[in-house]
Protein backbone atom coordinates (compact mmCIF):
# COMPACT_ATOMS: atom_id res chain seq x y z
CA UNK A 1 0.00 0.00 0.00
CA UNK A 2 2.77 2.44 0.94
CA UNK A 3 4.63 1.76 -2.32
CA UNK A 4 1.49 2.41 -4.36
CA UNK A 5 0.83 5.59 -2.40
CA UNK A 6 4.36 6.87 -3.05
CA UNK A 7 4.24 6.14 -6.77
CA UNK A 8 0.80 7.75 -7.00
CA UNK A 9 1.66 10.92 -5.09
CA UNK A 10 5.19 11.75 -6.24
CA UNK A 11 6.37 12.66 -9.73
CA UNK A 12 8.67 10.19 -11.47
CA UNK A 13 11.44 12.81 -11.53
CA UNK A 14 11.44 12.93 -7.72
CA UNK A 15 11.36 9.15 -7.38
CA UNK A 16 14.48 8.87 -9.54
CA UNK A 17 16.50 11.33 -7.43
CA UNK A 18 18.84 10.53 -4.56
CA UNK A 19 18.77 12.75 -1.47
CA UNK A 20 21.67 15.16 -1.01
CA UNK A 21 23.89 13.60 1.63
CA UNK A 22 25.95 15.55 4.17
CA UNK A 23 28.78 13.57 5.75
CA UNK A 24 28.83 13.10 9.53
CA UNK A 25 31.77 15.14 10.84
CA UNK A 26 31.57 14.66 14.61
CA UNK A 27 35.03 14.43 16.21
CA UNK A 28 36.70 14.96 12.83
CA UNK A 29 38.81 17.81 11.42
CA UNK A 30 36.22 19.11 8.97
CA UNK A 31 37.82 19.93 5.63
CA UNK A 32 35.01 18.80 3.33
CA UNK A 33 32.48 21.63 3.04
CA UNK A 34 34.38 24.78 1.97
CA UNK A 35 33.62 26.59 5.23
CA UNK A 36 35.64 29.41 6.74
CA UNK A 37 37.37 27.74 9.72
CA UNK A 38 37.62 30.92 11.77
CA UNK A 39 35.16 32.23 14.34
CA UNK A 40 34.88 35.81 15.61
CA UNK A 41 37.09 37.38 18.28
CA UNK A 42 35.40 37.80 21.65
CA UNK A 43 35.08 41.59 21.32
CA UNK A 44 33.21 41.19 18.01
CA UNK A 45 30.99 38.52 19.57
CA UNK A 46 30.10 40.88 22.40
CA UNK A 47 29.16 43.63 19.95
CA UNK A 48 27.06 41.14 17.99
CA UNK A 49 25.23 39.97 21.12
CA UNK A 50 24.26 43.57 21.82
CA UNK A 51 22.87 43.84 18.29
CA UNK A 52 20.65 40.76 18.55
CA UNK A 53 19.64 41.30 22.20
CA UNK A 54 16.52 43.24 21.29
CA UNK A 55 15.70 41.36 18.09
CA UNK A 56 11.87 41.09 18.08
CA UNK A 57 11.60 37.34 17.54
CA UNK A 58 7.91 37.48 18.53
CA UNK A 59 7.23 39.42 15.32
CA UNK A 60 7.55 38.47 11.67
CA UNK A 61 10.76 39.84 10.14
CA UNK A 62 10.89 42.59 7.55
CA UNK A 63 9.67 40.66 4.47
CA UNK A 64 12.03 42.59 2.20
CA UNK A 65 14.98 42.77 4.64
CA UNK A 66 15.44 46.35 3.47
CA UNK A 67 18.27 47.34 5.80
CA UNK A 68 20.26 44.19 5.04
CA UNK A 69 19.60 44.53 1.32
CA UNK A 70 20.96 48.08 1.37
CA UNK A 71 24.08 46.96 3.23
CA UNK A 72 24.66 44.17 0.68
CA UNK A 73 24.29 46.64 -2.19
CA UNK A 74 26.83 49.00 -0.64
CA UNK A 75 29.42 46.44 0.44
CA UNK A 76 29.27 44.60 -2.89
CA UNK A 77 29.09 47.73 -5.05
CA UNK A 78 25.92 46.59 -6.81
CA UNK A 79 25.20 49.01 -9.71
CA UNK A 80 22.37 51.47 -9.12
CA UNK A 81 20.56 50.10 -12.18
CA UNK A 82 20.38 46.66 -10.58
CA UNK A 83 18.24 45.14 -7.84
CA UNK A 84 18.84 42.21 -5.51
CA UNK A 85 16.80 39.28 -4.24
CA UNK A 86 17.66 37.58 -0.94
CA UNK A 87 17.34 33.85 -0.39
CA UNK A 88 17.71 31.27 2.34
CA UNK A 89 21.13 30.35 0.99
CA UNK A 90 21.99 30.14 -2.71
CA UNK A 91 20.00 26.90 -2.86
CA UNK A 92 16.70 28.73 -2.43
CA UNK A 93 17.67 31.22 -5.12
CA UNK A 94 18.48 28.40 -7.56
CA UNK A 95 15.10 26.90 -6.73
CA UNK A 96 13.27 30.22 -7.23
CA UNK A 97 14.88 30.79 -10.63
CA UNK A 98 14.02 27.31 -11.88
CA UNK A 99 10.51 27.34 -10.38
CA UNK A 100 9.75 30.37 -12.54
CA UNK A 101 10.46 28.56 -15.81
CA UNK A 102 7.87 27.05 -18.09
CA UNK A 103 7.35 23.28 -17.99
CA UNK A 104 10.01 21.26 -19.88
CA UNK A 105 12.33 24.27 -20.18
CA UNK A 106 16.01 23.50 -20.74
CA UNK A 107 18.70 24.25 -18.15
CA UNK A 108 22.39 24.08 -18.98
CA UNK A 109 25.64 24.02 -16.97
CA UNK A 110 29.21 22.77 -17.39
CA UNK A 111 30.18 19.44 -15.88
CA UNK A 112 31.48 18.83 -13.28
CA UNK A 113 29.69 21.64 -11.49
CA UNK A 114 27.62 22.45 -8.41
CA UNK A 115 25.30 19.48 -7.89
CA UNK A 116 22.27 21.58 -6.87
CA UNK A 117 21.80 22.98 -10.38
CA UNK A 118 20.97 19.50 -11.63
CA UNK A 119 19.24 18.35 -8.43
CA UNK A 120 16.75 21.21 -8.42
CA UNK A 121 16.20 21.21 -12.19
CA UNK A 122 15.37 17.50 -12.27
CA UNK A 123 13.15 17.73 -9.18
CA UNK A 124 11.07 20.34 -10.98
CA UNK A 125 10.72 18.24 -14.11
CA UNK A 126 12.95 20.47 -16.25
CA UNK A 127 15.28 19.29 -19.01
CA UNK A 128 18.85 19.41 -17.67
CA UNK A 129 21.89 19.37 -19.96
CA UNK A 130 25.57 19.49 -19.11
CA UNK A 131 28.68 20.04 -21.19
CA UNK A 132 31.95 18.46 -19.98
CA UNK A 133 34.81 20.79 -19.16
CA UNK A 134 38.15 20.37 -20.90
CA UNK A 135 39.84 17.31 -19.46
CA UNK A 136 43.27 18.65 -18.54
CA UNK A 137 42.54 22.27 -17.58
CA UNK A 138 38.88 22.19 -16.47
CA UNK A 139 38.31 25.22 -18.70
CA UNK A 140 35.00 25.69 -20.49
CA UNK A 141 34.79 23.83 -23.77
CA UNK A 142 33.46 26.95 -25.45
CA UNK A 143 32.71 25.47 -28.91
CA UNK A 144 30.79 22.62 -27.25
CA UNK A 145 28.93 25.06 -24.97
CA UNK A 146 27.92 27.32 -27.85
CA UNK A 147 26.83 24.30 -29.92
CA UNK A 148 24.70 22.97 -27.07
CA UNK A 149 23.15 26.39 -26.45
CA UNK A 150 22.08 26.60 -30.11
CA UNK A 151 20.75 23.04 -30.00
CA UNK A 152 18.66 23.07 -26.80
CA UNK A 153 17.98 26.82 -26.34
CA UNK A 154 18.33 26.79 -22.52
CA UNK A 155 16.35 29.41 -20.64
CA UNK A 156 18.86 29.28 -17.77
CA UNK A 157 22.63 28.69 -17.90
CA UNK A 158 24.57 28.31 -14.65
CA UNK A 159 28.28 29.20 -14.60
CA UNK A 160 30.09 28.91 -11.25
CA UNK A 161 32.90 31.47 -11.06
CA UNK A 162 35.15 30.02 -9.59
CA UNK A 163 33.80 26.58 -10.36
CA UNK A 164 32.91 23.98 -7.76
CA UNK A 165 34.45 21.40 -7.48
CA UNK A 166 37.34 22.26 -9.82
CA UNK A 167 38.15 25.62 -8.10
CA UNK A 168 39.23 27.41 -11.29
CA UNK A 169 38.00 30.64 -12.85
CA UNK A 170 36.67 30.28 -16.37
CA UNK A 171 38.00 32.72 -18.95
CA UNK A 172 36.11 36.00 -18.79
CA UNK A 173 35.83 36.20 -22.57
CA UNK A 174 34.30 32.70 -22.71
CA UNK A 175 31.55 33.79 -20.31
CA UNK A 176 30.96 36.94 -22.35
CA UNK A 177 30.62 34.81 -25.48
CA UNK A 178 27.96 32.73 -23.73
CA UNK A 179 26.16 35.89 -22.56
CA UNK A 180 26.08 37.17 -26.15
CA UNK A 181 24.41 34.05 -27.54
CA UNK A 182 22.25 32.85 -24.60
CA UNK A 183 18.51 32.92 -25.33
CA UNK A 184 17.64 33.25 -21.64
CA UNK A 185 19.27 34.01 -18.30
CA UNK A 186 22.92 33.43 -17.47
CA UNK A 187 23.55 32.97 -13.74
CA UNK A 188 27.16 33.61 -12.75
CA UNK A 189 27.50 31.92 -9.37
CA UNK A 190 30.15 33.75 -7.36
CA UNK A 191 29.94 31.79 -4.12
CA UNK A 192 33.75 31.86 -3.78
CA UNK A 193 34.24 35.49 -4.83
CA UNK A 194 36.05 36.46 -1.56
CA UNK A 195 38.98 34.25 -2.60
CA UNK A 196 39.01 34.95 -6.34
CA UNK A 197 39.60 38.65 -6.91
CA UNK A 198 37.29 38.44 -9.92
CA UNK A 199 33.62 39.23 -10.48
CA UNK A 200 30.95 39.95 -13.05
CA UNK A 201 29.09 42.38 -10.79
CA UNK A 202 30.58 45.32 -12.67
CA UNK A 203 29.19 43.82 -15.91
CA UNK A 204 25.56 43.77 -14.74
CA UNK A 205 24.69 47.01 -16.51
CA UNK A 206 26.17 45.70 -19.78
CA UNK A 207 24.09 42.50 -20.04
CA UNK A 208 20.34 42.44 -19.44
CA UNK A 209 20.37 38.62 -19.24
CA UNK A 210 23.16 38.46 -16.62
CA UNK A 211 22.43 37.66 -12.98
CA UNK A 212 25.17 37.34 -10.36
CA UNK A 213 24.54 35.06 -7.40
CA UNK A 214 26.52 35.18 -4.17
CA UNK A 215 26.39 33.79 -0.65
CA UNK A 216 27.82 34.80 2.72
CA UNK A 217 28.49 31.14 3.57
CA UNK A 218 32.08 30.99 2.31
CA UNK A 219 32.82 34.36 3.86
CA UNK A 220 32.36 32.82 7.30
CA UNK A 221 28.60 32.94 7.86
CA UNK A 222 27.52 29.50 6.64
CA UNK A 223 25.22 29.04 9.64
CA UNK A 224 23.07 32.01 8.61
CA UNK A 225 21.96 30.49 5.27
CA UNK A 226 21.91 33.73 3.29
CA UNK A 227 22.35 34.16 -0.43
CA UNK A 228 21.53 36.94 -2.84
CA UNK A 229 21.01 37.50 -6.55
CA UNK A 230 21.78 40.76 -8.34
CA UNK A 231 20.66 41.85 -11.77
CA UNK A 232 18.07 43.54 -13.96
CA UNK A 233 15.33 45.09 -11.81
CA UNK A 234 12.52 43.76 -14.01
CA UNK A 235 13.85 40.20 -13.78
CA UNK A 236 14.27 40.42 -10.01
CA UNK A 237 10.71 41.76 -9.79
CA UNK A 238 9.36 38.60 -11.46
CA UNK A 239 11.39 36.28 -9.20
CA UNK A 240 10.18 38.16 -6.13
CA UNK A 241 6.62 37.15 -6.99
CA UNK A 242 7.35 33.52 -6.10
CA UNK A 243 9.70 34.17 -3.18
CA UNK A 244 7.99 33.06 0.00
CA UNK A 245 7.31 35.91 2.47
CA UNK A 246 9.59 36.25 5.49
CA UNK A 247 12.20 33.89 3.99
CA UNK A 248 15.04 35.73 5.78
CA UNK A 249 14.48 35.51 9.54
CA UNK A 250 15.14 38.46 11.82
CA UNK A 251 18.22 36.94 13.50
CA UNK A 252 19.83 36.40 10.10
CA UNK A 253 18.93 39.93 9.02
CA UNK A 254 20.45 41.53 12.11
CA UNK A 255 23.51 39.28 12.22
CA UNK A 256 24.37 39.53 8.53
CA UNK A 257 23.90 43.30 8.56
CA UNK A 258 26.25 43.54 11.56
CA UNK A 259 28.81 41.18 10.04
CA UNK A 260 28.95 42.88 6.66
CA UNK A 261 29.76 46.16 8.39
CA UNK A 262 32.85 44.47 9.85
CA UNK A 263 34.51 43.81 6.51
CA UNK A 264 38.00 44.23 7.93
CA UNK A 265 37.68 41.04 9.96
CA UNK A 266 36.58 38.95 6.98
CA UNK A 267 39.29 40.44 4.77
CA UNK A 268 41.92 39.35 7.29
CA UNK A 269 40.47 35.86 7.40
CA UNK A 270 40.19 35.47 3.62
CA UNK A 271 43.75 36.76 3.14
CA UNK A 272 44.98 34.18 5.65
CA UNK A 273 43.06 31.43 3.85
CA UNK A 274 44.55 32.50 0.50
CA UNK A 275 48.08 32.43 1.93
CA UNK A 276 47.46 28.98 3.39
CA UNK A 277 45.93 27.83 0.10
CA UNK A 278 49.18 28.65 -1.69
CA UNK A 279 51.17 26.70 0.90
CA UNK A 280 48.90 23.63 0.80
CA UNK A 281 48.95 23.68 -3.01
CA UNK A 282 52.75 23.69 -3.00
CA UNK A 283 52.92 20.90 -0.42
CA UNK A 284 50.42 18.73 -2.30
CA UNK A 285 52.36 18.98 -5.54
CA UNK A 286 55.53 17.85 -3.76
CA UNK A 287 53.90 14.53 -2.88
CA UNK A 288 54.49 11.57 -5.18
CA UNK A 289 51.58 10.57 -7.41
CA UNK A 290 49.56 13.68 -6.46
CA UNK A 291 48.48 16.40 -8.91
CA UNK A 292 46.94 19.49 -7.28
CA UNK A 293 45.03 21.89 -9.52
CA UNK A 294 45.38 25.69 -9.21
CA UNK A 295 42.61 27.20 -7.09
CA UNK A 296 40.80 30.54 -6.95
CA UNK A 297 38.51 29.32 -4.15
CA UNK A 298 38.98 28.21 -0.52
CA UNK A 299 39.55 24.58 -1.48
CA UNK A 300 41.87 22.55 -3.68
CA UNK A 301 41.02 19.70 -6.03
CA UNK A 302 43.75 17.08 -6.36
CA UNK A 303 44.16 13.84 -8.26
CA UNK A 304 45.66 10.68 -6.82
CA UNK A 305 47.23 7.69 -8.50
CA UNK A 306 44.73 5.47 -10.31
CA UNK A 307 42.18 3.78 -8.02
CA UNK A 308 43.72 5.22 -4.84
CA UNK A 309 41.35 8.12 -4.05
CA UNK A 310 38.81 6.15 -2.02
CA UNK A 311 41.54 4.33 -0.08
CA UNK A 312 43.25 7.60 0.78
CA UNK A 313 39.91 9.16 1.74
CA UNK A 314 39.09 6.32 4.14
CA UNK A 315 42.57 6.32 5.72
CA UNK A 316 42.36 10.09 6.28
CA UNK A 317 38.97 9.62 7.92
CA UNK A 318 40.41 6.93 10.18
CA UNK A 319 43.02 9.48 11.25
CA UNK A 320 40.28 12.01 12.10
CA UNK A 321 40.35 14.11 8.93
CA UNK A 322 37.30 14.50 6.69
CA UNK A 323 37.73 15.72 3.12
CA UNK A 324 35.51 15.15 0.05
CA UNK A 325 35.78 12.04 -2.08
CA UNK A 326 34.73 13.01 -5.62
CA UNK A 327 36.07 9.89 -7.33
CA UNK A 328 32.75 7.96 -7.18
CA UNK A 329 31.25 10.58 -9.50
CA UNK A 330 33.55 9.29 -12.23
CA UNK A 331 34.27 11.09 -15.49
CA UNK A 332 36.68 13.99 -15.09
CA UNK A 333 36.58 13.54 -11.31
CA UNK A 334 37.76 9.92 -11.25
CA UNK A 335 40.61 9.56 -8.72
CA UNK A 336 39.96 13.09 -7.41
CA UNK A 337 39.68 14.37 -3.85
CA UNK A 338 38.85 17.88 -2.62
CA UNK A 339 40.19 19.51 0.53
CA UNK A 340 38.97 22.74 2.14
CA UNK A 341 41.64 25.09 3.46
CA UNK A 342 41.43 25.02 7.25
CA UNK A 343 43.45 26.60 10.01
CA UNK A 344 47.26 26.23 9.65
CA UNK A 345 47.40 23.47 12.25
CA UNK A 346 44.56 21.59 10.52
CA UNK A 347 46.27 21.92 7.14
CA UNK A 348 49.50 20.56 8.64
CA UNK A 349 47.70 17.56 10.12
CA UNK A 350 46.13 16.88 6.74
CA UNK A 351 49.41 17.09 4.82
CA UNK A 352 51.27 15.00 7.40
CA UNK A 353 48.56 12.32 7.36
CA UNK A 354 48.33 12.31 3.56
CA UNK A 355 52.12 11.99 3.27
CA UNK A 356 52.13 9.03 5.65
CA UNK A 357 49.26 7.32 3.82
CA UNK A 358 50.87 7.69 0.38
CA UNK A 359 54.19 6.36 1.69
CA UNK A 360 52.37 3.41 3.25
CA UNK A 361 50.57 2.63 -0.02
CA UNK A 362 53.80 2.81 -2.01
CA UNK A 363 55.65 0.56 0.46
CA UNK A 364 52.84 -1.98 0.26
CA UNK A 365 53.21 -2.06 -3.52
CA UNK A 366 56.95 -2.86 -3.39
Image (spheres, helix red, strand yellow):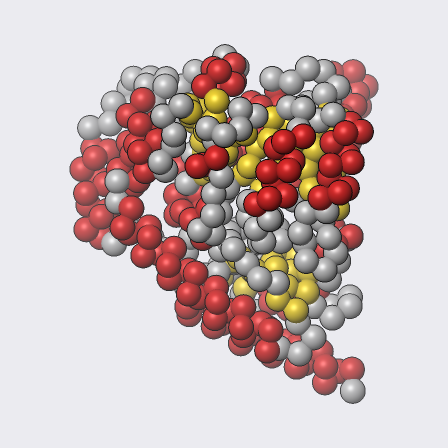
**Is residue 70 positioned above or below 292 on the image?**
above
**Is residue 319 positioned above or below 103 on the image?**
below
Left or right: 320 as drawn, with respect to 70 = right
The quarter in which the N terminus is drawn is top right
The x, y position of residue 358, in whole percent, is: 66, 77
Quarter of the image holding residue 86? top left
Kindly tell me whether residue 14 is visible in this rendering: no
Quarter of the image holding residue 119? top right
Residue situated in front as seen by the camera: 346 or 294:
294
Residue situated in front as seen by the camera: 28 or 96:
96
**Residue for point 61% across, 20% down:** 99
Number of numbered discs visible in the structure rendering: 0
Kindly tell me whether residue 304 is visible in this rendering: yes
The x, y position of residue 188, in whole percent, is: 55, 37
**Residue for point 43% across, 61% down:** 274
The x, y position of residue 340, in whole percent, is: 52, 58
**Is residue 316 positioned above or below 330 on the image?**
below
**Residue for point 66% across, 28% down:** 182
Residue situated in front as seen by the camera: 183 or 119:
183
The quarter in which the C terminus is drawn is bottom right
Residue situated in front as seen by the camera: 306 or 201:
201
Left or right: 117 as drawn, with respect to 5 = left
The x, y position of residue 85, in whole percent, is: 44, 24
**Residue for point 65% across, 40% down:** 115
Amino acid sequence: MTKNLITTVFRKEVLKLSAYKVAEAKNLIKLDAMENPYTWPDNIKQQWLKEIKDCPINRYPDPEAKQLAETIKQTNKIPAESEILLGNGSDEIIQLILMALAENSAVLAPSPGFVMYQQVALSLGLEYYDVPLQATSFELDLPAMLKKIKAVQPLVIFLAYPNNPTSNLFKEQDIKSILDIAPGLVIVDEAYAPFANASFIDKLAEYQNLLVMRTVSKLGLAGLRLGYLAGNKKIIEQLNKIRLPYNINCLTQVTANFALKNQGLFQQQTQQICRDRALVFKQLNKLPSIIAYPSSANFILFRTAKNQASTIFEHLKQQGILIKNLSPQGGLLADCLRVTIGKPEENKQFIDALTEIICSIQNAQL
